[in-house]
Amino acid sequence: MKSTESTILVVDDEELFRGRLARAFAKRGLQVFTAADYGQAIEIIGEHRPAMAVIDLKMPGRSGLDLIADGRKIHPGLRCVVLTGYGSIATATEATKLGALYYLPKPADADDILKAFARDPGLRLDLTEDDWQPPSLARMEWEHINRVLRDCDGNISSAAKKLGIHRRSLQRKLQKYPPGS
């Protein structure tokens, strides 16, 4: 991928997801900044002024909506894409009103996110077909399982019940390393 706008901020409280996205963006030639919460993100926006930001909607403390509003006050040229596992029409509308380009459900991969940014002609992203590689089914399953487990505060029995699988089956799946995208 080629870009004249080559900086991106990834804001997500899930360390595993944040790290995976950061590595994927770095592989695509972007300079990546990461933040786990609103405060860290505001500092990075003020200091580095990234061209793009991928923002998780639901985080401890202040929300992604607050970050979009305040981040764009600091850096009006900041382009934002919102990610969430808890989507609704109301929050999508609010995010767009605050200046987000697009709203994607989790789990989204780097290619989905870059495609959303490419909708803004001002970014001048030059994406080729080679840049688009969908995540594997195994990867999507692994991410979904981990999101449900997190929503259940790490309770294996509760997560297994929500997923509709046996607790031991879930434990076996969790012992495996995450599959590649």
Image (cartoon, rainbow, N blue to C red):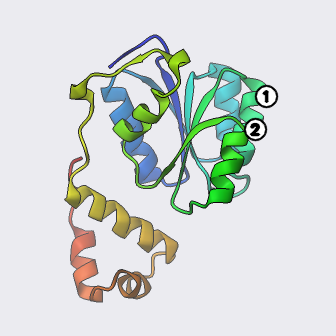
The image quadrant that residue 100 belongs to is top right
Residue that badge 2 annotates: 69
Count of numbered circles on the image:
2
| Residue 7 rendering spot, x and y as whole percentages | 50, 21
Q: Position of residue 171 (x, y in %)?
A: 27, 79
Query: Which secondary structure lies at badge 2?
Result: helix
Residue 7 visible at all: yes
Q: In the image, what residue occupies the spot 41% across and 22% down?
A: 30
What's the residue type where badge 2 is placed? Ala
**C-alpha gap between disc 1 and disc 2:** 6 Å
**Residue for point 30% across, 87% down:** 167
Residue that numbered label 1 is attached to: 73
Alpha-carbon neighbours of circle 1 within 10 Å: few (<14), some, or many (≥20)?
few
User: Looking at the picture, how far across and down is residue 109, in whole percent?
Assistant: 36, 44
Considering the numbered disc 1 on the image, is that residue within a helix, a strand or a loop? helix
Looking at the rendering, in which quadrant would you find the N terminus? top left
